[in-house]
Image (spheres, helix red, strand yellow):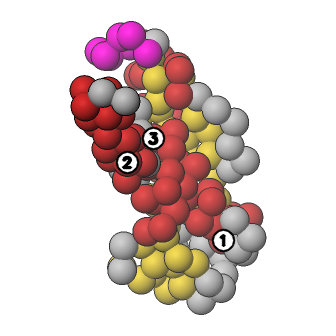
Amino acid sequence: MSPTSSAAQRAVQIWKAGVKAVNSETLVSQAIQVSDQELTICGHTIPLQGQERLLVTGAGKAGSGMAAGVEAALRGSALAERTSGWVNVPADCVRRLSKIHLYPARPASLNEPTAEGVYGARQILQKMSNLQPDDICIV
């Protein structure tokens, strides 16, 4: 193996490790802990009374992975059953999640406002306007 190919292989390994280190799904799932009594996000604890709903909203390329990370962190908890959401993402980032709707707000190649993005933003605002005082919203 030549020194050039070895250096190139190391560069690729470093790049892959960097990409893995900032995986939005992994980072979000690790940042959230839940029990029947509390929800903790990045060290901030929210007491749970058992009847509140959790709404997850957002937008952007990382939104798909972040929403999946929320679902992974909540999986099996009572709060998961009271979770819903709407996240605007580029069309190539849409995947099926169990509780959070990923909406194709723009084509992957177009990074500017679209009619679909406006529609998605209105859906988010509508869902947020239905929140009750005890509900929780993660944006």
Disc 1 vs disc 2: which is toward the camera? 2
Q: What amino acid is at disc 2?
A: Ala
Label 3 element class: helix
Looking at the picture, does residue 112 appear above or below residue 130?
A: above
**What is the CA distance from the residue labelled 1 to the residue labelled 2?**
33 Å
Specify whether residue 30 is in view.
yes
Q: Which residue is drawn at 72% across and 47% down?
A: 98
| Residue 109 belongs to the span the image colors magenta | yes
Where residue 70 appears, x then y in whole percent? 55, 58
Q: Is the magenta stretch mostly helix, strand or loop?
A: loop
Secondary structure of the residue carrying tag 1 is helix
Observer-side mark, 2 or 3, equals: 2
Q: What residue type is labelled 1?
A: Leu
- The answer to whether the residue labelled 2 contacts the one labelled 3, judged by CB atoms less than 8 Å apart, is no
Q: Name the residue furthest front.
A: 1
**Residue 80 position (above or below residue 13):** below
| Residue position marked by numbered label 2 in the rendering | 17
Which of disc 2 and disc 1 is earlier in sequence?
A: 2
**Front-most of residues 7 and 47:** 7
What residue is at 37 percent from the left and 41 percent from the top?
13
* Residue beneath disc 3: 63
The residue under label 3 is which amino acid type? Gly
How many badges with numbers are in the image? Answer: 3
Above or below residue 85? Residue 83 is below
**Callout 2 secondary element:** helix
Q: In this view, does 63 lie to the left or right of 54?
A: left
Tell me where the magenta segment starts and ends, as one range.
108-114
Q: Name the disc covering residue 92, or none.
A: none
Tell me the distance, in whole angstroms, between the alpha carbons under discs 1 and 3: 20 Å
- Specify the quadrant that holds the N terminus: top left
Which residue is under mark 1?
A: 79
